[in-house]
Image: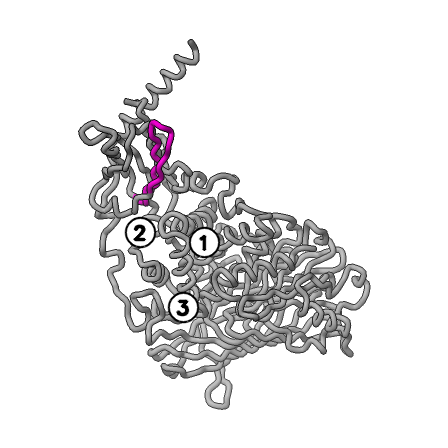
Amino acid sequence: MKKIISLLSLLTFCAGLNVQAQSQESNYNPHKAFNPLFTADGGNMFRSADGTPGPKYWQNSADYDIKAKLDTAANVLSGDVTITYTNNSPNKLNQLWLELVQNARKNNSKAAKVRGNLSEKRASKGFDLRNVRIKKGDKWQQADYKVVDTRMQIRLDKPLNANGSKIKIDISYNFPLPEYGRGGYMDSKNGAIYEVSYWYPRMHVYDDLRGWNTRPFLGSGEFYLDYGTIDYKVTLPEGMLMAGSGTLMNPDEVLTDEQQERLQKARQSEETVMIRTEDELDEPATAQSDDGMLTWHYRMEKTRDVAWAASKAFLWDAAIAKYDSGNESLAMSYYPVESLGDDGWGRATHFLKRSLEIFSKQWLEYPYDTAINVGGPTGGMEYPGITFDSYRAKGYTLFLLVAHEIGHNWYPMVVGSNESRSPWMDEGFNTFIDIYAHEIFNDGEFAPKRDGEYAPDGGNPAKEIVPFITQDEARPIVSKADALKGDYYHPLEYFKPAFGLKLLRDVVLGPEQFDYAFKQYTKHWAFKHPGAKDFFRAMDNYSGEDLSWFWRGWFIHNWKLDQAVTDVTYPDENPEKGAKITIKNMEQMPMPVLVTITTADGNTQQHKLPVEVWMKDETFTFTAPTSQRVTKVELDADQKLPDVNRDNNTWSDNQK
């Protein structure tokens, strides 16, 4: 008797839900969703309407020649950088802007004030500019400059001409190394480990979208930089191995003969080769010099930045990564003995090699000769050709870090979006491509991807995203990085855009159409500066679909999705003539409709209705080709969509 009462109660409850779904008012406005004026402006000669660079697209370039020295006793870096800046724009420039990121650590900086942290303990002096000069003809002269927080403005007495004119800037500087952050230093059993980033003044970008992009560095947002060649020399105490972005130009001056031989072996091996072993930690890690100092010379072309690390404590291994084109890159890892182990950094180079190969096959071939992991104090940070990952990381976490941070070399190191204004084009895209790296690596050893970046509770991403998009404080994905509260930064700039692209791939377009469009966007904007509209237009044009409803609802706004099935009837009350099924869009976000129909004989039908069914009205009725009575209709039975209310997704004939 108890079972019968429970069943009756359940049926009564379900029937109530169905009546509620039918009677509840919808918040959906079809014109708002499918407004044809998605972007008020069309393409132009710089950026085409199809999402590709226009016939007169331009971008400026910056080449750097850097000479630096690390004082390991005082933990101070001193340097001199000569910048050759090329103005390819059609405009004369009467000023230049550079970024001085280390100034964010001053206790009177905007970053300190915005974060409410004016502590002397955390503060530093930032960049100490000893000399700033510009070259006129054959002579250097003092520049007219002003430091404004994390920026430096150089005011030119004579404008820099357009269409390829160049100017040289020379800056002598020093700054105390930060102990932690996006770089840092730490002690290990065998010596200090230094990870050095944002270590020279860099040019701000002048582009056709905003002119000078001079956003102050506040901490959360990252960077937007021009491409060029960076040639740099760093002088270190003898015995410190240095790992740097780009190609080591003087291995015979800084490496031992045995290290050079092992490197050559690694270039022929797909298995990891040790360059410096645990047994050699008591031996000199480098070549020797007369004065106890060595100068390491690195060079990197078509890059927006470089970073480096150095330590006497480094173990070093390498293996070759091979691509379908026949090209290769040398994958290398540097880490302390504390990181050793088959569940730790013993696999790091293999993780790196396979990540390079997977991303190259899926999206665009990795363009550089080398790629480096460094195990040290930084939890996870990316730079062109080099990443800083926690020396403590193991297993899944280490693979996550290696794949994610090297994945940033595609977005935004090669496809050079503005991280400070559109962090989702950086973190979101990279998290998205990581999903498939997890699936592919070693037949899914670390799949599915479930971590702090994507579905952090380890469950269904479609369910886990719902709490973040239903909260009143949740902002749209298209927000400035520094405008997002801390608890929302990862969900809205990593998780939500990555899941949105997966929805686009798996539900809206299908893998073939999506992959083709995403590859075309990546190819056309490699080493260039795309904006959000360029991405939206490229995906529309190369997929062949008008996705403005998707960009508007998922990215530009924070619209919610709630699909309901409200009724099932039969023409002339005859099930043999088919079933008329009525569905309703309860909230503002439209989506394709995934319908599962069960008939009295136990058979099921799967139907996918395109998003265009919502163009005219909040309700839509379609006739399913059935010959028997329908017993159940369920929307999104596999729970692929982020439906905020699944109570109205199911209709049953028991509810009548």
Local crowd at mark 3 within 10 Å, few (<14), some, or many (≥20)? some
Question: Which of the two discs, 3 and 1, sits closer to the camera?
Answer: 3
What quarter of the picture does the C terminus occupy? top left
* Sequence-first tag of 2 and 3: 3
Amino acid at dot 1:
Gly
Q: Which residue is mark 2?
A: 552
- Seen from the viewer's position, the closer of residues 509 and 453 is 509
Count of picture labels: 3
Q: Which residue is mark 1?
A: 428
Farthest residue, direction bottom: 138
CA–CA distance between discs 2 and 3? Answer: 23 Å
Amino acid at dot 2:
Arg
Farthest residue, direction left: 572
Q: Residue at x 34, y 70 (%)?
A: 208
Residue 356 image offset from top left, x and y in percent: 56, 62
Local crowd at mark 2 within 10 Å, few (<14), some, or many (≥20)? many
Q: Quadrant of residue 89?
A: bottom left
Q: Which residue is mark 3?
A: 524
CA–CA distance between discs 1 and 2? Answer: 17 Å
Residue span colored magenta: 589-607
What quarter of the picture does the N terminus occupy? top left
Identify the secondary structure beneath mark 1: helix
